[in-house]
Image (cartoon, rainbow, N blue to C red):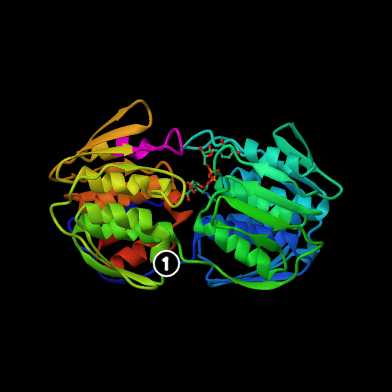
Amino acid sequence: MDKLKIIGGKRLHGEVNISGAKNAALPLIAASILVNGKTYFTNVPDLMDITSIRLLLEDLGATCKASKGYLEVDGSSIKKIEAEYDLVRKMRASILVLGPLVARFGHAKVSMPGGCAIGARPVNMHLSGLEALGASISIEHGYIEAKADRLIGNEIYFDMPTVTGTENLMMAAALAKGSSVLRNAAKEPEIVALADALNKMGAKINGAGTAIITVEGVKNLSSADIKIIPDRIETGTFMVAVAATGGDVLIKGCEPDHIGGLINKLKAADTTIIPSTDSIRIIGNKPIKNVDIKTLPYPGFPTDMQAQFMTLMAIANGNSMIHESIFENRFVHANELLRMGADISISSGNIAMVRGVKKLQAAQVMASDLRASASLVIAGLVAEGTTVISRVYHMDRGYEAIEKKLSLLGADIERI
Ligand code: EPU
């Protein structure tokens, strides 16, 4: 199994290009199920999760053509409505095929995603939303089965904002009969990207990016060209890496507006940030100032940046409090950071007290999930000595060519 070997202590310098966003690409690719024809995607990141959703669509019968940065999905050949356990267990986001399948074919059977390293992650709001649209739902032998002759538009109220839940229901409502209103919807840029793409396919969606989304159902959707938006979490991960190493990097092809919650906190930590329309220059300054964060739905501080920010605070000048309010078990990286000399204690499960130390020490550590692996890479970049990170497959799910991009910025990192 691949590992990453990092010799710490190098400042990052130069320019880096941001890839297409994993969490935008996944629902967009799932949306191609809604089309009885071809959907063309550009700026597609080369990631394990993208391969997983493509394989799932192919298993359903879709014809896919993939080349560097490009994916074409022909939904006209879809014959099967069942997303099997062996494909779904590799990636929870496979639940995104549920809404489109039942909306287009009136029937869907999707293996129920289990818990994962960061929490229980139930899908109850996806299911109650589909029920509100008239689907009958049953769960048997580990499979969710949804049936409806045609979905009927309705009001859906989310108990809390859910990103993939909002996406699933937006896709389902797009082909429902009549209008739907999604209240307390998630507002992430990936939701806006999905609504824009669905509208390009002929859907009638308004309000994406706000808490109330209205969807006027249409009979069918048609072919469209879709460009995947830049990955705000990859952008943020590079920003934190530069801040931690004290480097100076121009991050290109990104959307600074999508990462405002992090920019605000990095500025408070005394990092210099110069945003422009599609790039951000970031200059790390020492000492790093201690800052408290609380993860919140967009536009709050993203939970997907919490682990990386914890590494930064581990070498800050003072104490900081990190409150994880989205997932119940998203501090597994803290235990690995302790092995590298960080001083972190977890109280009441979702609050971490980080007492900044002068230096981290290299160690052998293990990645537990995607963003935890990014936090360990950043720790390796600043630690004294050689860090070896195992279970790098977590990283490969969501960061395109991470070691190549970091090497070009001057990091001493290789895959072994
Ligand atoms: N929740 C429920 N019931 C539901 C759905 C969600 O209780 O039916 C809860 C979750 O357990 C969680 C909260 O609602 O406590 C929010 O979860 P959400 O549904 O928004 O998460 P998600 O859609 O499963 C997406 C991203 C995650 C990201 C979260 C939060 C994708 C494919 N995944 O997950 O990305 O952390 O939103 O922003 O878009 C990652 O990329 O590393 C990652 C985990």
**Residue 52 placement (x, y as % from top left):** 59, 54
* Left or right: 190 as drawn, with respect to 231: right
Q: What is the quadrant of residue 414 in the picture?
A: bottom left
The front one of 354 and 166 is: 166
Question: Residue at (77%, 42%) from the top-left corner?
Answer: 146
Residue found farthest to the right: 149
Ligand 1 lies under 8 Å from the Cβ of mark 1: no
Residue 56 in sight from this viewpoint: no
- What secondary structure is marked by label 1? loop
Residue 378 position, x and y percent, is: 28, 52
Count of marks placed on residues: 1
Q: Which residues are magenta?
A: 323-336
Which residue is at 65% across, 50% downward?
168
What percent of the width, then of the height, locates residue 338? 25, 36
Q: Is residue 193 left or right of residue 219?
A: left
Q: Vertical placement of 240 versus 346: above or below?
A: below
Q: Nearer the viewer, residue 169 or 80?
A: 169
Which residue position is annotated with label 1? 255
Is 416 located above or below residue 290 in the figure? Answer: below
Q: Position of residue 416 (x, y in %)?
A: 35, 55
In the image, what residue type sits under mark 1? Answer: Glu
In this rendering, the answer to whether 390 lies above or below 31 is above
Report if residue 179 lies within the magenta region. no
Crowding around mark 1 (Cα neighbors within 10 Å: few <14, some 14 to 19, many 20+) is many
Q: Does any portion of residue 40 appear in the rendered image?
A: yes
- At 74% from the left edge and 60% from the top edge, which residue is drawn? 34
Residue at the (56%, 44%) spot, across then down: 162
Left or right of 334 in this view: 146: right
Q: In which image quadrant can residue 10 be found?
A: bottom left
Considering depth in this image, is 309 or 340 the residue closer to the camera?
A: 309
